[in-house]
Every structure is written in C-alpha cells, then in structure tokens.
Image: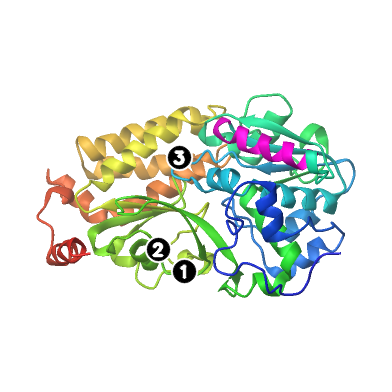
Amino acid sequence: MMATHVSPDAPSAHRLFAAGGPGLDEHRRRFGGLPVGSDTLVPVLDEAGLTGRGGAGFPTGRKIAAVSARKAVVIGNGAEGEPLSRKDAMLLASAPHLVLDGLSLAADAVGAHQVFLYVPSHAMQSVKNALAERRAAGWDRYQVSVVEAPDTYVSGEESAVVRRIEGGPALPRDRTVIIPVAGVRGRPTLVNNVETLAHIALIARYGPRWFRSIGDPDEPGTRLVTLSGALNKRGVVEVPTGTPLTDLIGRHGGTDPRCLRAVLVGGYHGSWIPAAALDGMRLSQASMAQAGASPGAGVIHTLPVDECGLARVADIAAYLAEQSAGQCGPCLNGLPRLADLLDELAYGRVGDDLLGEIRRMLGLVDGRGSCRHPDGTARMVRSALDAFAADVALHQRGHCEAVLIPGPAYSDARRDASRT
C-alpha cells in the first residue's frame, strides 16, 4: 500500500538528492523499500498536483490515466537534447534508483507489458550499474530495456522517442493518434521525463501532503533548475517551485541580476526576458506566463551586459535550423531562412524591410510544422525581438548596445560583487 502520511524521515528542502549517492544501499537507507504499486497512484498524484518536469508541464496523474492497460508500454525519457540543460544527466548519475522506482510504479499503474529507459550515452553506465544492483537485490518487478538516445535536439520529443525505441531514427513523426492511445508498435504508451518519475517515487512514499508542503500552492513541490551563462556559480540546483528568479540568479547563481542584460528561460525553445523585468517573477507557469514565458525544462541561461543579445539569438537560431528533422517545409526551408535573416540582423544590414521579413518568416513556420520544433524556435525569436528591441534600433544606426558604456546600476553591481 502506498504511504499517504508525512514521514518524519522524509527529505524536506533538498529531496531528489537526499540519498547522498547513487548506490542502492544509500538509496535504501534514506528512502526505505520500494513502495508497492497500486491503482491508487493516479488519484494520489492528482492530489499532490505533480506536473511534468520535461518541459510541457502537463498534470502527471492525468497523463498516466490516459493510458489503457492493454499491453501498455512505459518509457522513462532522459534524452535531454536541450544543450543548456544538465538536470536529467545529474539525476541519472546521482539518484538513478529514484528514477527507476518511479518507472516501476508508473508501470504498475498501467499494467505495463514492456518498460524502457531512454538515455544518452554518457548516462548509460550509471543506469546499467543501478539496474544490476536492483537485479542482484531482487528489487525490481520489471525487466527494463535501456535504449541509447542520440545527442540531437529533437531526440527527446515524444514521437521521436517512440520511433527510436521501435528501431527507427530518433525523429518526430506526424501524429494522427496520440501516443497514450497508440505509441510503440501501436500499443498504448506512457512517456515520462526522468525527473517526473523521481518525484512519483517520493510521492508514493511520503504522500501528497508532504509533496505540497513546499513550493507554489498551485504548482507544488521542488524542481531541478540548470543555471548557466554569465553567473559566478553555474550548475544544477533543486529549489521549491515559485522561487523568485532574482533569488535563483542572486543566491544560487552568485550574481547580481543588475550585471545581466537578459535571461533565457526554458532553454532554446524558451523565452528571453530583459533583466529589468525579472523583479517579482517566480519559477511557476502562472507567474512567467505574464511575460509570455514558461519554466520549460528548468533552464535559466543568463546574458551579460557586454554581450550582444541579437548575436546570441542568431547563433541559437542557426543551431536549431541545423538540428531540425528536415521532414517538412518549415524545418527544411523556413528555419534556415530565418537563421540567415537573424544573422543579417546581428552582423549585417538592418532595416524595416529586414524586420518585416523576419516577422513574415515567423508566421510561415509557426504552427505549420510536422512537430513543435518550428513553434519553439519561433517563440524564442519573437521573445528576443521584444527583449532586445532597443538594440534592434541601435543596430539600425550601426551601433550595438553591448559596446556602450555600462550604466550606473551595472557599475554599482560590479563594485558590490567584487567585495563578496
């Protein structure tokens, strides 16, 4: 039976890495035995309010409930094709048994016929070591097949995951039927991000009330965030949902937000937010939606004041164009054209006609692709045109905001930072 009480030994602030190491002995000492799976998992997750940690943020209980028990397939997705994200890799290296516990519980909930774990090459060994420990201890109820995820941006998209597990290329496919209904070889298929699975394992042990004891009441719990860019401290941190973005940058990133030009939240398919707009914004869907943004896969990437935002956007767009599946017009033709236009905006000519052509191209690729890759690229570029609007105007006059003399707030912040 699943625990529905608050355990006095349950981790509180730092939950996912509480075992202190990747081994089964450490895991068992900290978290106890593997909870017994049951048909109560979905209502427990609904009560906990767990949402997916892979980017889309869909309610986890509802996602599991959508999969029928007819020879279902369950997949743990740790592909992490997003270049700015490191959270899944750290979780698989440091707490693989929480992930595997959650995978087993999800498999129980849908009566799984097959179970897979889909991970990149650098995570394969830690996962295989953990599986070997569980087999030796008689710990697992399922034979988990490990499938290597290619190091590409689109390899973690749900239909690309299914296609790869079927033995094909890790490329998105057109979907006429949703994956929970017909995924791997036509079977009902559940795909969950590995961080989501780890949270499932904790909720099954300690219950919904414990999970909700920290974080935003509307989006409770903790989540992993990858901090990168112009920060004094970079890496993966576990924080409560609803944490102020300025706190993430200041306390966890060791950097005064006034030293920054902008922040890219959610990764390469995310949104740019000017540093001046960060005050009052929190790590939650509701808070960030006011700026047209989302926590996504938990990426906070910072841009310093002395780096051109338009140049950074052009570089990202070129990468995304190269990483497309190339299976439809928006990816095959639209994204390369968009990348060329952004390169001109950052490094070459600028005029109203160029900006008009960029916006026209955004309209041509957005919502018209075979997968969501063009949509995510369009979202990132649109947010950049807003966040760096002042710099666009400067570029039109042959100047760049990044080479101007920093203002007094930046100078004060740099002086304060040098004292710490």
Q: What is the distance, in whole Å, between disc 1 and disc 3 at their CAs?
A: 23 Å
Overall secondary structure of the magenta stretch?
helix
User: Of callouts 1 and 2, which one flags the residue occurring earlier in the amino acid sequence?
Assistant: 1
At x 56% / y 64%, what residue is drawn?
Answer: 222
Q: Identify the mark at residue 83; answer none if there is no mark.
A: 3
Q: Is residue 45 visible?
A: no
For marks 3 and 2, give the CA distance: 20 Å
Does the residue at mark 3 contact the one at mark 2 (Cβ under 8 Å)?
A: no
Q: Residue furthest right?
A: 70
Q: In the image, what residue occupies the spot 73% across and 40% down?
A: 133
Q: Nearer the viewer, mark 3 or mark 2?
A: 2
Taking the spot 57% from the left edge, 27% from the top edge, the residue there is 327
Label 1: which secondary element:
loop
Specify the amino acid type for callout 2.
Answer: Leu
Q: Which mark is residue 248?
A: 2
Q: Which residues are magenta?
A: 121-135
Circle number at residue 264: none
Q: Secondary structure at mark 2?
A: helix
Contact? badges 1 and 2 (CB < 8 Å): yes
Residue 244 on the magenta segment: no
Quadrant of the drawing holding the C terminus:
bottom left
Residue type marked 1: Thr
Determine the secondary structure under disc 3: loop
216 w.r.t. 45: above or below: below
Q: Residues within 10 Å of mark 1 (few under 14, many from 20)?
A: some
- Tell which of 193 and 234 is nearer to you: 234
- The dot on residue 243 is 1
Question: Dot 2, how many residues are within 10 Å of its Cα: few (below 14), some (14-19), or many (20+)?
Answer: many
- Residue pushed farthest top? 168
In the rendered image, residue 122 lying in the magenta stretch gets the answer yes
Q: Is residue 86 visible?
A: yes
Query: Vertically, is 62 above or below 331?
Result: below
